[in-house]
Amino acid sequence: MKATPNAPVGSRRRFDVWGFLIHAVLVIVSLICFIPYLHVVAKSFSEDAYVIANKVFLWPRGFSVEAYAKIFADASILKSLYVSVIVTVLFTVLGMVVTICAAYPLSRRQLKGRSTLTFIFLFTMYFSGGIIPEYMLINSLGMLDTMWAMILPLAFSAYNLLILKTTFTHSVPVSLEESARIDGAGHFRILTSIVLPLSKPILATLSLFYAVGRWNAYQDALFYIKHNVDLRPLQLKLYYLVVQASESFQLEATEVTLSNPEVLKASVVVFATIPIICIYPFVQKYFVQGTMLGAVKE
């Protein structure tokens, strides 16, 4: 009696052309995003002579940490880092508190006129007063050259509000809210004990949006922080460094110099990016879950 083979002789796994193309495109896009940053990291750890000669691509040449030593020796850069951390933390906390307090009532059916209020918030995403009226407002409120000029104007995002409102509406079972009401819970207790614990993924996602957006922003600080140099955030410090280097750097033919601003700029870029890179792995799983909320509905 012949043994029956476990699988048919002619059965083979078919080659998935579309799967291969999708993976290839993802790999190419990932490399396009990653290679420029890797190039900047390589420049930041290279000696000035190799960078001047354009011999640095993806690996440091003449390994050196002199540029990072200059960063840590510069008290103004460390002070700018401190200002950026404080502003980002306050901005993220205030932005999330305001967004939650606005999204929860708009997600409740008991609120009359919630469609009109939602439309008003949506309207601000397409139309705004512009930079000049905003500057005049900040000036009239006496917030120029203060830390609040970098926190209050952008601490609320209508886009984040709409995302959070949709999550509260579709992701929190109505039966849980009704049970809590029967037990005598009010809106504040329902929000803190039921709605927020069930919305941790989207809360982490929006917190990341607020933090990264504030950390990378420098234009508002460029407008509002003029005389108080101690309040310049790290990104604005980087901006001034780039402008100063591009205006003052000249390589004379008769004079050999080994002080290249490009190395310092690359090291400051890496120095300014590391905090966000260190934070992202801790919220990555929440970020993935948060972006998928509302994508599939029963």
Image (spheres, rainbow, N blue to C red):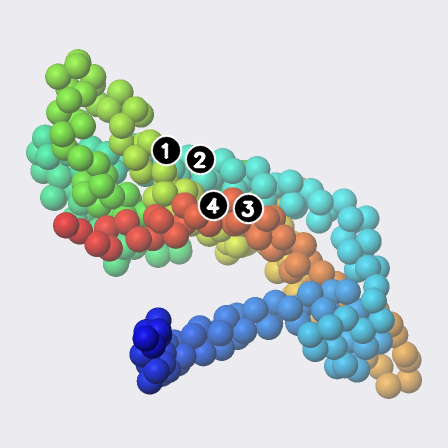
Q: CA distance from mark 1 to mark 3?
A: 20 Å
Residues under numbered marks 2 and 3 in contact, where contact means CB atoms less than 8 Å apart: no
Query: Where is mark 1, residue-wise?
Result: 97
Front-most of residues 234 and 225: 234
- N-term-proximal mark, 2 vs 4: 2
Q: CA distance from mark 1 to mark 2?
A: 6 Å
Residues under numbered marks 2 and 4 in contact, where contact means CB atoms less than 8 Å apart: no
- Choose mark 1 or mark 3, whichever is in front: 3
Which mark identifies residue 279? 3
Q: CA distance from mark 2 to mark 4?
A: 16 Å
- N-term-proximal mark, 1 vs 3: 1
Q: At 34% across and 77% down in the image, what residue appears?
A: 2
Looking at the rendered structure, the secondary structure element under dot 1 is: helix
Q: Position of residue 245 (x, y in %)?
A: 71, 67
Q: Position of residue 75 (x, y in %)?
A: 76, 44
Q: At 85% across and 71% down in the image, what residue appears?
A: 62
Q: Is residue 28 left or right of residue 258?
A: left
Q: How many marks?
A: 4
- Choose mark 2 or mark 3, whichever is in front: 3
Q: CA distance from mark 4 to mark 1?
A: 19 Å
Which mark identifies residue 93? 2
Mark 2: which amino acid? Val
Q: CA distance from mark 2 to mark 3?
A: 15 Å
Query: Where is mark 4, residue-wise?
Result: 283
Looking at the rendered structure, the secondary structure element under dot 4 is: helix
Number of other residues with Cα within 10 Å of mark 4, as a class: few under 14, some 14 to 19, many 20 or more: some
Residues under numbered marks 3 and 4 in contact, where contact means CB atoms less than 8 Å apart: yes
Looking at the rendered structure, the secondary structure element under dot 2 is: helix
